[in-house]
Amino acid sequence: MTEWSRCRWVWNECVAKSKAVYAHNQAHPEAKQTCGPAQLDRMLTEARAVTPWLAEGSSVAQQQIIRDFGRSRAKALKDIDDRVPQGRRAGMPGYKKKHGTRPTLNYTRRGFRLKDGRLHLAGGIVLTVVWSRNLPAAPTSVRVHQDSVGHWYASFVVPAQVEPLTETGLALGVDWGVKEIATTTSDAHDLPHAEFGKQAQAKLYRYDRMTARRRPAKGQARSKGYQEAQRWRARTYQKIARQRQDAARKWAKKVVGDHDAVAVEDFRPKFLAKTTMARKAADAAIGTAKKSLVEMGHKHARDVRLVRPAHTTVDCGRCGARTKHALPLSERTFTCTTCGAVSPRDKNSAHVMLVRAGLAPSGAEGARPSGAPLQKAA
């Protein structure tokens, strides 16, 4: 925690420097100043020379916190230049409070080493790591951070390694939804909505009431009971997130293992947060399932194609004809007036994904990439 205190001090000095430069440029536009990495590195060097407490820490971690600040500031400035709406743009980096931010330390290759299963960080810090799995290659950097529950983690960056799987000659179309998280062209590969958040709702309500009762008055320190209620609440949310991630990864592994190509709806579910389905859509965690499928496809050298989702509910998956009116959400069966095809609405959308991705259908239960030998999905 002492090392994080030093890095937090450096971050806050960068924020103060940035604000001072902005105020100077507003008052004197003819003599503008800059607040780039070079100026901040120079500021850090001068501060370490006159502050023994700061010099006792690792310069690697302190330089990396400056890089993190630079990236956050550059993203915020880019959003302003691109005229991104206020509610969607990244805010300018602010001060990190002692009790309001979770510690995170970044080290590059020269700032850490692994020896006898232990992690040695610059500054004489030695950590005993409980390994979840062996590293496939030598790491290039490591991030040591604390989560909302209070657990510490070390995340290593290693070169990606592709693990090709046996070719199957099959392809799959994936359409996202709320009743079922993923509806595919194969009934065996649909992903049902497990409703992990709904199952834990009673427990969450209880912890919310405990937190509200124990909330300290303004200006008072947080009591142990309040911090304990916060930890219980955070632990429950963490369990829900891990359940969703585990279910998504297992489903993605099955899909990638059984198909050479996958046509995925490039769906961005942010708009669902403004509808009556917001809670159920959030519990579905469509973004987690989509991310897991894309990552698993890249890991195993599968062809994952993101398909534009516009008009997928009104196009026919067999002939490609488009209906003359939008279908209401209550209408769950798609009927094509051109070719007479009748199918469940989401299944039809999954077949549309295959057509738009350039994959030729091979029957009701599967599809194959163009030019591949014709096979049926199991």
Image: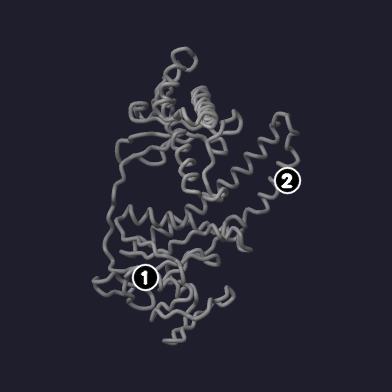
Question: Which percent across, then down, holds residue 61?
Answer: 43, 27
Nearer the observer, 269 or 199: 269
Label 1: state its secondary structure: helix
Give the quadrant of residue 113: top left
Classify the position of the C terminus by image quarter. Answer: bottom left
Label 2: state its secondary structure: helix
Question: Which percent across, then down, holds residue 147?
Answer: 53, 38
Q: Earlier in the sequence, mark 2 or mark 1?
A: 2
Circle 1 packing at 10 Å, graded few (<14), some (14-19), many (20+), is some
What residue is at 30 percent from the left and 42 percent from the top? 159
357 relative to 1, above or below: below
Nearer the observer, 32 or 169: 32
Nearer the observer, 314 or 133: 314
Name the residue carrying label 2: 209
At label 2, which amino acid type do we have?
A: Arg
User: Is residue 1 visible in the rendered structure shown here?
Assistant: no
147 relative to 43, above or below: below
Circle 2 packing at 10 Å, graded few (<14), some (14-19), many (20+), is few
193 relative to 209, above or below: below
- Which residue extends farthest front? 30
Q: CA distance from mark 2 to mark 1?
A: 49 Å
229 relative to 109, above or below: below
What residue is at 48 percent from the left and 34 percent from the top? 145
Q: How many numbered marks does the figure carry?
A: 2
At label 1, which amino acid type do we have?
A: Arg
Name the residue carrying label 1: 356
Question: Which percent across, then down, holds residue 100?
Answer: 60, 33
User: Is residue 41 visible in the rendered structure shown here?
Assistant: yes
Question: Which percent across, then down, holds residue 46?
Answer: 44, 16
Give the quadrant of residue 125: top left
